[in-house]
Image (cartoon, rainbow, N blue to C red):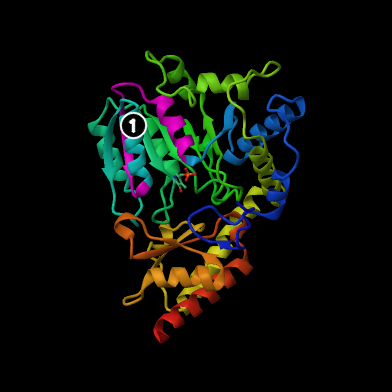
Amino acid sequence: MKSFHPAKRLLMGPGPSDVHPRILEAMARPTLGHLDPDFQGLMEEIKTGLKQAFQTKHKMTYPVSAPGSAGMETCFVNLVEEGDKVVIVKHGVFGERMRQNVLRAGGEPVMVEFDWGTAPDLNLVEQVLNQNTDAKILAFVHAETSTGVRADAAALCKLAKDHDCLTIVDAVTSLAGIPVLVDDWGVDAIYSGSQKCLSCTPGLSPVSFSEAALEKIRNRKSMVRSWFLDLTLVMDYWEGEGGRSYHHTAPVNALYGLHESLVMLFEEGLNATFERHRMAHDMLVAGLSDLGLEMFVAAEDRLPQLNAVAIPEGVDEAAVRSRMLNDHGIEIGAGLGPLAGKIWRIGLMGNSARPEAVERCLNGLEASLKAGHNS
Ligand SMILES: *Cc1c(COP(=O)(O)O)cnc(C)c1O
């Protein structure tokens, strides 16, 4: 075997996003023990930074030592007990994964489904909540990465409160790209990922839990069906102030990276970061329009950080993606499920949401589309 040296790519797909060199550099620093006092200081700073990023005072806010899917599972496996009814708003791939999580936790999913590419209709969600007065939880995806659609998180959380439901919110693609207001919205459990708008490497999942969520977990009649993700156990490590105890060996260097991404987020400022994502999006949409390409999602429902682009009639979409990668060193995403072959997904997440990146992507697309016409 020989050392692996990856080609330099510009990552503009649905994640991972382009990782800033400062983050990679932070991750290459010497490994400390996971109970080293210096490392424990870093853990406290990460918790404080994540609370600021989620805009919450929730004490139980920390990164799960595994990717976004593990953050998702942490929320469901802790909050859902045998027989619990969970209303799930599904408008893409990740709503289906929520259903799988509820089933595995022994709960009863009630689906409210919407066409991919459209935002969830609040009236329909309300109707289903009215028909299921025994529902305990409402779960939804804030930024649906498979479609590029933003759900109205504030309104969905309010509906949940009005129907005595706790909320589980997927903020994997939204955190640090558009405002995520955990306390203002009254979110009970939320999870994100390190590799989307935080622009860190994949493998960590920031989560946050409200007091009401913790109360439900404390009152469980049965054990959480996962040892590794059981919050009450993990917390002896992440919360054990003055007396942390071993739960698992934290991914020390990965956490250096997350810490650096938070440092960079607050250097720029949350609002300036959101504004940068919005400006990159506007620039992309205008440039795509000049190339004769159209957006798949209605303007008012679009996410700035995930752009679903309609594939024009007669274009070999996979050939364009492979020319983008091989000739231009740029990764863009394909459509999933019912949108396979219908859209490309261009991510403007974190470090990828820069004018230079947008320009490179537009130039690459123009050349790749032309190359298709000539062949
Ligand atoms: C990427 C993503 C996930 C899963 O995160 P992984 O880090 O790939 O496990 C979950 N939900 C949404 C909306 C995502 O975009």
Secondary structure under the numbered disc 1 in the rendered image:
helix
Q: Is residue 280 above or below residue 224?
A: below
Residue extending furthest toward the left? 131
Q: Is residue 82 magenta?
A: yes
Foreground residue among 69 and 323: 323
Q: Does residue 133 appear in the picture of this structure?
A: yes
> Where is residue 223 drawn, in percent x and y?
40, 16
> Where is residue 349 drawn, in percent x and y?
55, 55
> Where is residue 146 drawn, in percent x and y?
40, 54
* 226 sits to left or right of 181: left
Q: Which residue is mark 1?
A: 102
Q: Please give the range of residues in magenta.
A: 69-93
Q: Is residue 310 above or below residue 144?
A: below
Foreground residue among 43 and 316: 316
Q: Is residue 136 above or below residue 18?
A: above
Q: Is residue 322 above or below residue 28?
A: below
> Where is residue 21 drawn, in percent x and y?
70, 54
